[in-house]
Each structure stands twice: as C-alpha cells, then as structure tokens.
Image (cartoon, rainbow, N blue to C red):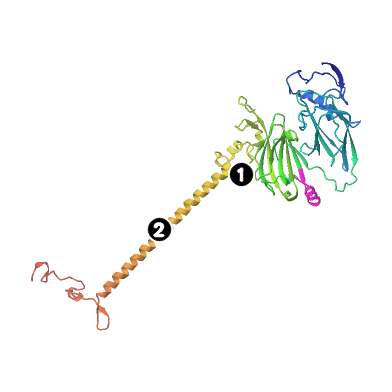
Amino acid sequence: MEGWWVTTFPGSFLVILISSSIGSPGAGPPGRPLDSLMTEEYCKNFTYGNPHRSEFYSPGYPGPYPAGIMCFRTISADYGYFVRLDFRDQFNVEPPSHDEPCEYDYLEIRDGDKGYSSLLGKFCGSKFPPIITSSGRSLWLRFVSDGTIEYTGFKAVYSFIQNPLETLPFIPKCQFEVGGSMDFIGHSNISEEHLQFANNYSMPIDCTWIIRVEKEKKVFLQFQEYDLKKPNDCNFNYIQLFDGKTDIDHLKKKFCGSKAEYHTSGADVLYVRFYTVGEGIGSKFEAFFTASREVSELETCSEDEFDCSDSNCIDPDLLCNGMRNCAFGWDEESCAAGGSNIPLDFSQTHVIVIIICLTLLLVGMCAGMIFNLVRKLTEDKEDIQASREKSLASLAASAGSLGPDVDGHRTVERQDAVSVEDCNGCYVPGPPGGGFPFNSKD
C-alpha cells in the first residue's frame, strides 16, 4: 500500500515528502542505491539525531528506513567516562532468515572509535538489544539496509557515565592526518609518550594514519622499511589498509608476514593502521605515498601533470626527487647518470635476482681463472723439476767417463788434439784418417 507522510530532520528546516513505496517490494530494482545527496539527508537522523536530547534514530524514523542505505557514526565521551547506549520505544529491523546472523538489515556496534574496533554485536529483528556500555571512551555504529523489505527502525538514547576505576593516565589518540602530492609515514611518527605508555602498562600501540588527497585522485603507497618483530604472527603485530572507511568491508590488505607490497587505494582517503603489542612492540615500518590520478586509454595527462606511462598522472614537482613515485620509476629515468638508465630499486625482487645471478656468474668466472692459473703453475713446476732431474742425470753420466789424475782429479782424454801452443792459441782438429789437411803436402 502506497502512502505519503511528512518527516523533518532534527536540527534542520528541511521537510521531505517520502513515499512508503521507496525500496519496498515491487517498487523498483532490488538494491538500487540511493544517490549521495539523498543518502546524506536520510542518514542525518542517524549521524546527528537530536544531540540536545542525546538521541539518534534509524534513517526515516518514525517511518520505515529506506532500502540500500549505509550510515555511520561515532559517539565519544570525555576522558574518564564510558558511553552507555539504550534503546527505547521500538526496535524493528528486518530479521534474519532462520537462525542465521543478521544478514539483510542490521545495526552494527563496535567497542571503540573505528570500524575495526572489537565487535559488540549486530542487531536485527524485533527484540530490543541489551544496554551496551563501552570499555573505553567511544562506540562506533553502522546501520545497513539491503534492497528489499523495510521496517520502522529504532530509537536510541546515549549517556556518559563516569569510570570510577580509571587509573591509567590520559594519553591522546595515536592518529595522524597527512596529505599533499607526497609524504612519509612510519613508526618514527609515534611519540615516545605512546611507547612508554605501552611498555609501562602492557598496552598495545594502535596507531592510524589518515591519508587524504585531492578529489578524483588515488593514494599510491610504497614501503621502504618493513620489519616486524614477530613476522607471521598476526596476534602481535600487523598493518592494515582501508579504502575510504575503517569498517571491515573496506579492509583491502593486511600485512603480518615478512613482506609488505605496494597498494593503490580505490578512494581519495586511505587509512593505514599499525598495531603491535607484547613481543611485537619494537616492530618498524616506513612508507611514502604519492597522489596520482588515473586516466582511461582515451585520456591524457594535463599539461601540469607528469605521465607515468601506466595510466597514472602525478605532480611534476616529484620528478627527479630520488623517489620512484611512478610504479615503474619513469619519473626518475632522465635523472640517472648519463641520462639513459633507470635507477635500480634494490628492494624490488627482480632487481635482487639479477644482482644475485650476476654475482654468481662473476664468482664463477673468477674461480675458473684461479683454477686454471694454479693448474698451469703446477704443470710448469713439474716440467722444471723433470728438466732438472734430466740435467743431473746427464751430468752424472758425463762424470762417469772421466779418468783419475795423479792428484786424484779426473782429466779429459783427448785424442788427436793439438796443443794450443802449436797453433798460436787455436785448436785445429786432425784430418780424418790422419795425414795432411786439405790433401796437401809441403
């Protein structure tokens, strides 16, 4: 049955006529999302509610909530106080099928100020949730509806109650906001105060970096250092990357092993969460991000951008800054020695493999040269030794042909020798067979 009613949003003069057929069965294609402006207006009932009465409501309350909507809010108290949440008047959200957890429409509540905080519960159906009290200063809430069957929703009241057992000193949230065309993040941003607090009270270090870039741009994140004290143990240390929001649905990557890969966000906001506790404290990481704009095959980068030749454009001021802001490093190509080589990134796997192969090849060549040199020297030494032994043997044989002299010395026997005096210092051998030389006679 179709009908119309008038609803006003607290804290606003906006009046909207809403048809009861919005999102109802047969009213249109299931799951058809609302446009952003309509979503924002509907969510005001949930995100703002009535702060003067400390109340908030399901979108469209007291009428049915719309189909295909998702709203977020965080309720935070001052230091030393808890947040208490109670539901009044009605709670009427589409129930699950059979005994399954809430799978269609639900209210999600987490114990903290982020979408990755500990889950306190997902609530749906017509049964009132219990009174919920945070363990810290904040509660994170999300309301989700699918594309069919809407119910009348709920009304919630929140209050702040003092924590009489608060003994830990106050410490601000470990959260950082950065932006621009490029910047660095890492463990060095964490203050000594947070490190001492974690060590003194056995508390975790749980820090978040919110990276915001210009609209229509993405965040390209690269790790320069990644050293976890307990690699492959996600209970002690890890890094999470969230696109746009911090709820689990927007979790894109989680690193807790021995390597962290680069990541390009799907939105203009990237959340980087670094968690370490106990034996994991002391883990380190350093990364830098680049704001890039993705273009289609038919588009080109503008005149005030640098084309990375991979469908991404970056700020031209990043050229030749010593960092590979383009995925393939083309922004540093003309900056290398000689202007023709791309500087090597020694953290890349293929570069490491090439260096290892070249090193092994060089070591093999050197080992072969040394082996051949030693073998040649050994052979030459053996040849010299054999030659010396042969010479000694020859001398020994010659010594055997010498006769003893009167004084015990040996004298060489000369046959047909002519004394030096007979020819004025020259030696003339006798003619063969005797007689005069040259067959002549005086």
Residue ranking furthest to the front:
98
Q: Is residue 203 magenta?
A: yes
Look at 58% across and 38% down and name the residue there. Answer: 333
- Asked whether 331 or 394 is in front, the reply is 394
Image quadrant occupied by the N terminus: top right
- Asked whether 284 or 113 is in front, the reply is 113
Residue flagged by tag 2: what amino acid is it?
A: Lys
Q: Measure the C-alpha gap from mark 2 to mark 1.
A: 43 Å
Asked if labels 1 and 2 touch by Cβ distance under 8 angstroms, the answer is no
Q: Earlier in the sequence, mark 2 or mark 1?
A: 1
Give me the disc on residue 118.
none
Image quadrant occupied by the C terminus: bottom left
Q: Is residue 62 left or right of residue 305?
A: right
Question: In the rendering, at what x and y percent does residue 69 appear?
Answer: 78, 26
Q: Is residue 273 visible?
A: yes
Residue flagged by tag 1: what amino acid is it?
A: Ser
Question: In the rendering, at what x and y percent does residue 277 appear?
Answer: 75, 47
Q: Quadrant of residue 251?
A: top right
Question: Which span is picked out in magenta?
Answer: 190-206
- Few, some or many residues within 10 Å of mark 1 (<14, 14–19, 20+): few
Instruction: Determine whether the residue tagged by mark 2 lies in a helix, strand or loop.
Output: helix
Look at 75% across and 50% down and name the residue there. Answer: 278
The correct choice, above or below, for 181 with respect to 275 in the image is above
Look at 54% across and 47% down and name the residue there. Answer: 356
Give me the disc on residue 347.
1
Instruction: Determine whether the residue tagged by mark 1 lies in a helix, strand or loop.
Output: loop
The correct choice, above or below, for 135 with respect to 68 in the image is below
Residue marked by disc 2: 376
- Asked whether 122 or 170 is in front, the reply is 122
Q: Is residue 156 magenta?
A: no
